[in-house]
Image (cartoon, rainbow, N blue to C red):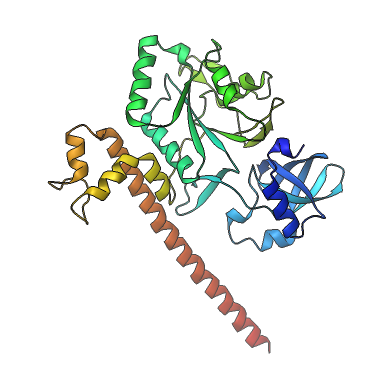
Amino acid sequence: MLEELGYTTELEDYRVKNNLSNFNVARVITEHKERYVVKSEAGDFEAELIGNLRYSAQDRSDFPAVGDWVAISEYDTNKALIHHVFPRTSIIERQAVDKHGEKQFIATNIDIGFIVQAINRDFNVNRLERYLTICNASKVTPIIVLTKIDLVSETELVSILESVSKRIQNVNIIPVSNEKNVGLDALKSIIKKGNTYCLLGSSGVGKSTLINSISGKNLMKTGEISESIDRGKHVTTHRELIVLEGGGIIIDNPGMREVGITESSNGLEVTFETIFELATQCRFSDCTHIHEKGCAIVEAIEFGEIDEDSYDNYIRLEKEKQFFESSAQDKKKKDKNLGKLIKSAKNVKRHNKY
């Protein structure tokens, strides 16, 4: 059972070495305001953190997230306590909405990220590169899934696929139509027993319908199609881990309007590999790669070796990354100063007491 959830010999070795053998092992399948549902060999349990784990947490990353492996003890019918969070092999994260310098976990321990976009209205190559950067920063293999291809002509489809291939190389692209049952076999062939997959995309692109098609069951509630915007209404309200009968684990996510970049230098390097390679060849060590005459990147754009739109998107994401890093440093400094202030107040209170 645990192997079907993705449990590995490395996780078992960690369990033994860290004296966790007296606890049961489970995987977090849903999370809502620090309340969890976990799945173990004994079934599903409503779970909460033990006090020590809760109060020793330094930041949000110390709390469990969907996809995490945890050590639990059962104390009542379908109730459990979480004592320990196992190390993660990968973390897909974004900048927390309206919280500068803070991160939000999307999912953990992911093998492949399905980047889902509807080909009719949601389609945007800049957004694809943004999701690719997040996956590459997390060392998660990205696969692009373009849905609702039945809503465009064959000519339009070919043109869109060419536009993606022009800017994005070495990433598998699967065009899919749930209505026409096109591309689903190709998608199903990727899913392997014990591997974990995460669906990433905006609201209404068909992620829940895709899960139903892959599983052959109505596992997820789907919204009706809105004639005014020609897409399904968003129905997923929380992250959820789903175990497929044929093998494989899928994590569905609420649609994300904002996908902010964190300190994802490695992600940018992989997504925009050609740009980074040319930057190392530039003869100016302090080049901005924007207007300098003789700049390797400026010349590559002029000669059509680099797509200008892709380069503009890279500049936007790089600035966003730098802003996040600056905000994170400011937040860390403020938190440190606040910690000193609290410690000082406690010392004064203790001194006055005696």
The quadrant holding residue 348 is bottom right
Report the front residue among 73 and 171: 171
In the rendered view, would you say 25 is above or below 332?
Answer: above
The residue depicted at 39 percent of the width and 35 percent of the height is: 129
Q: Quadrant of the C terminus?
A: bottom right
Report the front residue among 353 and 104: 104
Q: Is residue 286 left or right of residue 236?
A: left
Q: Is residue 195 left or right of residue 280?
A: right
In the rendered view, would you say 121 is above or below 337?
Answer: above
The quadrant holding residue 170 is top left
The quadrant holding residue 343 is bottom right
| Percent of width and height locating residue 7 | 70, 42
In the rendered view, would you say 183 is above or below 98?
Answer: above
The residue depicted at 41 percent of the width and 48 percent of the height is: 266
Can you see residue 285?
A: yes
| Percent of width and height locating residue 251 | 62, 34
Q: Is residue 241 left or right of residue 305?
A: right
The residue depicted at 39 percent of the width and 40 percent of the height is: 271
Q: Is residue 183 left or right of residue 304?
A: right
The residue depicted at 65 percent of the width and 84 percent of the height is: 350
Can you see residue 253?
A: no
Report the front residue among 71 and 38: 71
